[in-house]
Amino acid sequence: MTPPTDDLDAVPPGAGLRERKKAARRLALIDASHRLVAEHGLDAVTVEMICAEVGVSPRTFFNYFATKDDAVLGHRPWSLPEKTAAAFVAGGPSGVLLDDLVDLVVGLVAAPPPGSARMRRTLELAAAHPRLMAHHIAWMDRQKEQVERLVRERLGPAAAHRPDTVTALLLVCVHATLMRWDAAGGEGHVREHATAVVAELRALITA
């Protein structure tokens, strides 16, 4: 099945056609899972049903999502590029902690948000199915642990700031960047939105 044309733009500017098609296929799997769960219920839906809806094999499905629940929730692991993580831990790239959070946000957010309608459906399904909500909370905890390890390494044992506070601030930056990007219709690059969020936070803190 060819990915929907209107979803081919759901990738960062400059991405090639292959990356655009992969992003569109991922969104198609999310949409199919939402439709099927709404129609049949969470427990009745299988990975095979989702694959049949999109026209892909289960093998292809598992290239995008680890489980059916991950597809419904649109989960993708946060995986920082090694170079970005190493630079942050070493005290860079700017040496100013708040500014350096921008690079972490850029490294963590690989593609534009899936859109307000999808996010709203995801939240509705998670609220309706306790298992999905528990799965989402567990996923968030794993992402938080990954980020907090980096923050602790950056700050060191005699840190002037609490690692959990910095980690919480980073998670706020990620969420605010995604919301800002979505409000812009997916236009622009993640860095410009993340930079604007950090600038606004700095202004709020110093006001």
Image: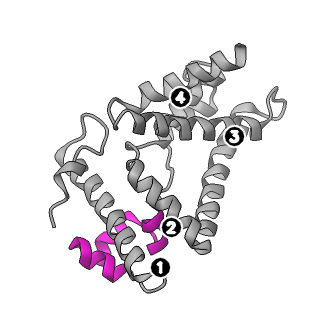
The residue tagged 4 is 102
Q: Is residue 4 left or right of residue 132?
A: left
Task: Tell me the kind of residue under disc 1.
Answer: Leu
Pinpoint residue 149: horizontal percent, then vertical percent. 68, 45
The residue tagged 2 is 125
Task: Tell me the kind of residue under disc 3.
Answer: Ala
Residue range highlighted in magenta: 47-74
Quadrant location of the N terminus in the rendered image: bottom left
Q: Dot 3, how many residues are within 10 Å of its Cα: few (below 14), some (14-19), or many (20+)?
A: some
Residue placed farthest to the right in the image?
Answer: 158
Q: Dot 1, how many residues are within 10 Å of its Cα: few (below 14), some (14-19), or many (20+)?
A: many
Q: Is residue 141 above or below residue 147?
A: below
Is 79 part of what is drawn in magenta?
no
CB atoms of marks 4 and 3 within 8 Å: no
Task: Tell me the kind of residue under disc 4.
Answer: Val
Pinpoint residue 201: horizontal percent, then vertical percent. 63, 23
Task: Mark 1 or mark 2: name the one nearer the start of the chain.
Answer: 1
Task: Mark 4 or mark 3: name the one nearer the start of the chain.
Answer: 4
The answer for how far apart the CA atoms under marks 1 and 3 are is: 31 Å
The residue tagged 1 is 42
Task: Mark 2 or mark 3: name the one nearer the start of the chain.
Answer: 2
